Amino acid sequence: MADTAAPKRILIVSAHPEPRSLTAALAAHAARELRAAGHEVRTSDLYAMKWKAGVDADDFPGLGPERRLDVLADSGAATLAGRLSPDIAAEQEKVRWADAVILQFPMWWFSVPAILKGWIDRVFTFEFAHGPSVPPPYSEGALAGRRALLAVTVGARESAFSDRGVHGPLADVLHPLQHGLFWFTGMAPLEPFAVYGSVDVAEERFAAVREAYGRRLGGLFTEAPVPFRSLTGGDYDHGMRLLPGVEPAGTSGLQLHVRPRP
Amino acid sequence: MADTAAPKRILIVSAHPEPRSLTAALAAHAARELRAAGHEVRTSDLYAMKWKAGVDADDFPGLGPERRLDVLADSGAATLAGRLSPDIAAEQEKVRWADAVILQFPMWWFSVPAILKGWIDRVFTFEFAHGPSVPPPYSEGALAGRRALLAVTVGARESAFSDRGVHGPLADVLHPLQHGLFWFTGMAPLEPFAVYGSVDVAEERFAAVREAYGRRLGGLFTEAPVPFRSLTGGDYDHGMRLLPGVEPAGTSGLQLHVRPRP
């Protein structure tokens, strides 16, 4: 991996219970490569941290015991008052610090493992990731200026996640993360890095996977992100619906929200 | 709700930390309505159960402490040997018992709350939900014969989840659950029941919501499920890709996998 650009800060969040897993090996590889290129890297190994997955009243210390928990309002109030539970505050500080966030995970049931969903649910609080106190969602959102990469291992073969594959195109399956989490909060998502057929990756293939991953990491700050449309760029009406005729003929579904590529 | 059909068994799984939440109220309403119609209902209130979200080695008791955890293989072996952790085994028994499964949850970051993702990750083990010991995935899968309903509360307004809405069509956003979880395991998913603008539902509107939900529950065993395509029905090639020309002109993305409706 060659990178002559200025050093950047990268947060790698990984989610696998086995320290000798492919996920752990890829997360370690990414950290090594990025550091070798002169970048600063911090990591959140969620299982090693025994990350708590479920949002609950303990996330917002100081609420009265008899108070009805209102997740949105209470998370926003605790964010603004600086009284989120310390584990959440620490992760928010890492996200704020980062120029890029990498989520390294195995695809379980067509999404992230629960512990990683819990990192998303708990860290991306109201008034931190979205809300009236931060810029409006999409493109110029609260976390704008950051890049984001999903690095996912997938048991199935690639054809099943192709444009006509039975599992759906990978971009569509990951849309809730790419567009719903990253783009919504203003982060610029790159195309995901996917390792298919990940149930059994022998040493020879692993070398090729590491090399391919290294190439993607080398482009972390230069690759063109997925060109999702801006909510404020004139493409949407006041009901947040894409205006008629904006998209190329034949486009439908989630791909409506991606600008045509040159 | 009128239902003159034979009594059925329904499992309601709900996921909200606040017992006085809209989610809890809707789950209780569903249980009451279904029981009033003569059905048997069991519930899994995940926060009340303190459901553990993260898959780890404790899920598969009896593995040596130094053994490298292989989630897929170890979960399959533990399932076949009947030595899954008791909390998982109890939920599998409920799913097997049920004629229909309802997931009642707030949409958090365009998906289920982490605790519910953890129910999915941990309960739908290899060799229970899919694998060589059970029928092949989709349509005739391991849990065929069951119906499934997502009952979701959504903070955003409906237009943002419409066909051209910025968040994506609700069906596409929920595809990982509707097609990836339910249909993959053989369950027949109904159209989701969604309550939009759920941040603040006043009493008058709540009465209308209850009534609308009651109508959907009344059709739980009679409504036509989403007509996803069968993997073995001749529509897909050996790479699990939809054959060319099978879909109506202009269809693309995830909707390729839904048969045209009359």
Image: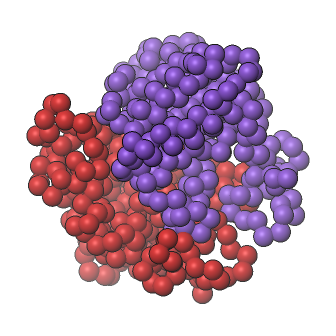
Chain colours: A purple, B red
Q: Residue furthest front?
A: A204
Of residues A26 and B48, the one nearer the viewer is A26
Above or below, A259 against B102 in this view is above
Quadrant containing the C terminus of chain B in the rendered view: bottom right
Above or below, A5 against A214 in this view is above
Of residues A131 and B181, the one nearer the viewer is B181
* In this rendering, position of residue A55 left or right of residue A139: left
* In this rendering, position of residue B249 left or right of residue B82: right
Of residues A4 and A11, the one nearer the viewer is A4
Of residues A77 and A125, the one nearer the viewer is A125
Quadrant containing the N terminus of chain B in the rendered view: bottom left
> Where in the figure is residue A193, as x and y percent of width and height?
57, 43
* In this rendering, position of residue B131 left or right of residue B196: left
Above or below, B236 against B118 in this view is below
> Where in the figure is residue A34, as x and y percent of width and height?
59, 23
Please name the residue shown 11% across and 54% down the image.
B82
Please name the residue shown 47% across and 60% down the image.
A157
Asked if residue B170 can be seen in this view, the reply is: no
* In this rendering, position of residue B257 left or right of residue A108: right
> Where in the figure is residue B162, as x and y percent of width and height?
68, 60
Numbered label tally: 0
User: Residue A204, located in which quarter of the rendered image?
Assistant: top left
> Where in the figure is residue B59, as x and y percent of width and height?
21, 41
